[in-house]
Amino acid sequence: MTMVPFFVLLLLLSSADAFQSLSPARSIRSSSLYSNKPFTVQLQAELDDEKVTQLFAWLSCTFAGDRRYDNLMLAFAAIFGNLPQDSVPVIMVETAMASLPPEEFPCGTPYGQFDREQASLGAMGAAQWTGKWKTRPHALLDVTQFSSVDEWHQSLPRGCKRTLQKAAQQNFTVTAKPIHPDKPAPHSSLAHFRCVVDHELRLLSYSSESFFDALAEAVSRYVGTTRMTGEIHEYRLDGKVIAFAHEVRKGSTIRGQWFYGNDISSQKYVWFHSVRDLVKRAIDAEGVSVVDLGPSGSDAFSELKQRYGFISVDDWPAVANYMGPFWRYDGVGKGRNSPIDWESMI
């Protein structure tokens, strides 16, 4: 197994007094890492269920407001590194695991509606539609040309039709779950975190060095999606979460904000099913004119979206109108406009 050098900053461990409450049975000052000298940790680029669980336990402490767990580099050192068992980071992991929530228990920070909407702006590309700077092209579908999702389906190439038919024949279940203000996001659980990690590592990890970059991206995206507003559409197979899609509606545009799924979901055509559902909701919704699947990470993905009618548009705010309130989800298929007038704050 390839070992990757990883340097942990000295300041992370220079205040061991702050960690005295972590484990009364152990003396933090006797830790072999409690010193004022830089040190090197060797990380093993290997992931299993236990390490995913440990990383989520670490994040759950961050969600709970424990600032000692705010450093992801320290988490990587503790979970993937060759640190002594009596070291501060390893004891932190043990402490986090001792209070690990159940697999599907939402434990995210209960952000208010204002904070959730504010956290949604950046990922939705607000920098461009507020005139701050240009972002990457977005893949857009004008749904005003269709009277039903079946009409959209019939407009697609034969291969796309076959793929959507296969997706419709799968035996997964889909549940819409609104993200309510002042409550943990419904996808802020270990079960959903597993999907994000699987998804990002499958796409981004191709070497031992990229492994940790992909894992950091997974954590960043997971934390990001649990902070936002909107609604998730949760996919289950045999009772287990295999994927979720995140929808945010603002102005006359529905944004397919994020999609994450494990290996099983990719075999079950879940992404294609989620796109069809998103198009259907947009066509059926009053006042919605555009579905926005956002920027693509590769030309191949842009081409895939284009086969389903989503054209990559450089000046996408001219087509996707976000200059209106966020949609507040009160239940499946129902909602009300947010009282926050973001345009007056720009």
Image (cartoon, rainbow, N blue to C red):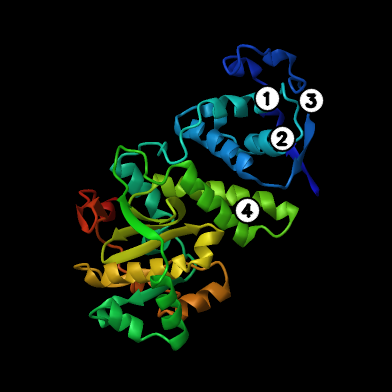
In terms of sequence position, does the residue under pointer 4 or pointer 2 come before the other? 2
Instruction: Return the residue nearer the eye: 73 or 44.
Output: 44
Mark toward the viewer: 3 or 4: 4
Instruction: Return the residue nearer the eye: 130 or 308.
Output: 308
| Residue 174 makes an appearance in the image | yes
In terms of sequence position, does the residue under pointer 1 or pointer 3 come before the other? 1
Residue at the image point whose x is 72% and y is 24% from the top = 85
Residue at the image point whose x is 52% and y is 36% from the top = 59
User: What amino acid type should be assigned to the residue bearing mark 3?
Assistant: Lys
Mark 2 secondary-structure assignment: strand
Q: Which residue is mark 4?
A: 214
Q: Which residue is mark 1?
A: 13
x, y percent for residue 188: 43, 43
CB atoms at circles 2 and 1 under 8 Å apart?
A: yes
Q: Which residue is mark 2?
A: 8
Distance between the alpha carbons at the discs numbered 2 and 1: 9 Å
Distance between the alpha carbons at the discs numbered 3 and 4: 29 Å
User: What amino acid type should be assigned to the residue bearing mark 4?
Assistant: Ala
Distance between the alpha carbons at the discs numbered 4 and 2: 19 Å
Mark 3 secondary-structure assignment: loop
Q: Which residue is mark 3?
A: 37
In terms of sequence position, does the residue under pointer 2 or pointer 3 come before the other? 2
Distance between the alpha carbons at the discs numbered 1 and 3: 10 Å
Residue at the image point whose x is 73% and y is 36% from the top = 81
Mark 4 secondary-structure assignment: helix
Q: Is residue 99 left or right of residue 19?
A: left
Mark 1 secondary-structure assignment: loop
In terms of sequence position, does the residue under pointer 3 or pointer 4 come before the other? 3
CB atoms at circles 1 and 4 under 8 Å apart?
A: no
Q: Is residue 113 left or right of residue 261?
A: left
